Image (cartoon, rainbow, N blue to C red):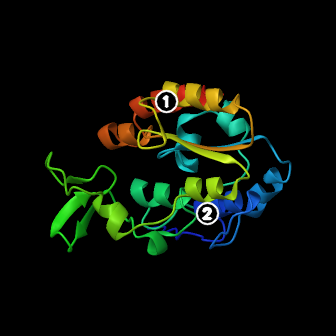
Amino acid sequence: MDIKYPDYNNSIVNLACSVLKHYGAENHNETLPIFDNYLKKNYKNVVVMLLDGLGVDALEHHLDKGSFLRRHFVEAISTVFPPTTTAATTSIESGLTPKEHGWLGWSLYFREIDKIVNAFINIVEDSDEKAADYHVAGKIIPYKSIYDIINDTGNATAYSVSPFGTNKISSHIEMSDEVERLCKLDGNKYIYAYTPQPDATMHEYGCYSSEVTSWVTIISLLE
């Protein structure tokens, strides 16, 4: 088995730290040089889109070389370990590794309340029961989000466009429309946008299914 380890000098953690550095905020890990170079152009809008599950392997399998995303491919960077949605998205929303932020997976056991909790939505695993009258993961393993850190600098306004974000959306179309709307606002902005596709379809039909090909093709049209 070809095991690939995370590279915390060339990863989504480093990308987030480049964003923090760009806006004059403290960052706790190394930055990503290739992204630092882009940010030197001082764009009014810095937009990072995370399409869950859409790694290099998926791009090469589901899209031809002439597609928009493959024509604009620049460099592969590493995810984190564990490579779960929860760990990865929290890393890109904090600039911290999973070891530092502690949000390792969708369901986490908290001995403080003796329950397994779905961390993002604060629900007891395999139930509709609210885990507590407070956000359990947010209280027990807190971290400061990249949005709060950037907003505190006063150098830009930061937004999270996702099903769980400051600007909530429920589809990739809504995501694209909301990013476009925010970009037209005055002032410097950092905009992070997240969609659970094609990962959700991969879980249901398999990574190399025709259903995933359809989703990746649709997403590639967000250009």
In this view, 71 is above or below 122: above
- Compute the Cα span from label 1 to label 2: 24 Å
In this view, 123 is above or below 63: below
Q: Is residue 89 left or right of residue 204?
A: right
Q: Please, what is the three-letter code of the amino acid marked with disc 2? A: Ser
Q: Please, what is the three-letter code of the amino acid marked with disc 1? A: His
**Picture residue at 74% right of the left edge, 48% below the top:** 74
- Give whichever of 213, 164 is nearer the camera: 164
Determine if residue 166 is in view.
Answer: yes
**Picture residue at 20% right of the left edge, 57% below the top:** 132
**Picture residue at 70% right of the left edge, 66% below the top:** 31
In this view, 122 is above or below 31: above
Q: Quadrant of residue 107?
A: bottom left
Check whether the beta carbons of the residues at disc 1 and disc 2 lie within 8 A of each other.
no
**Helix, strand or loop status at disc 2:** loop
**Picture residue at 69% right of the left edge, 64% below the top:** 25
Q: Position of residue 20 (x, y in %)?
A: 68, 60
**Residue annotated with mark 2:** 11
Q: Position of residue 142 (x, y in %)?
A: 41, 67
Dot 1 crowding, Cα within 10 Å, few <14, some 14–19, many 20+: some
**Residue annotated with mark 1:** 172
Q: Is residue 199 left or right of residue 193?
A: left
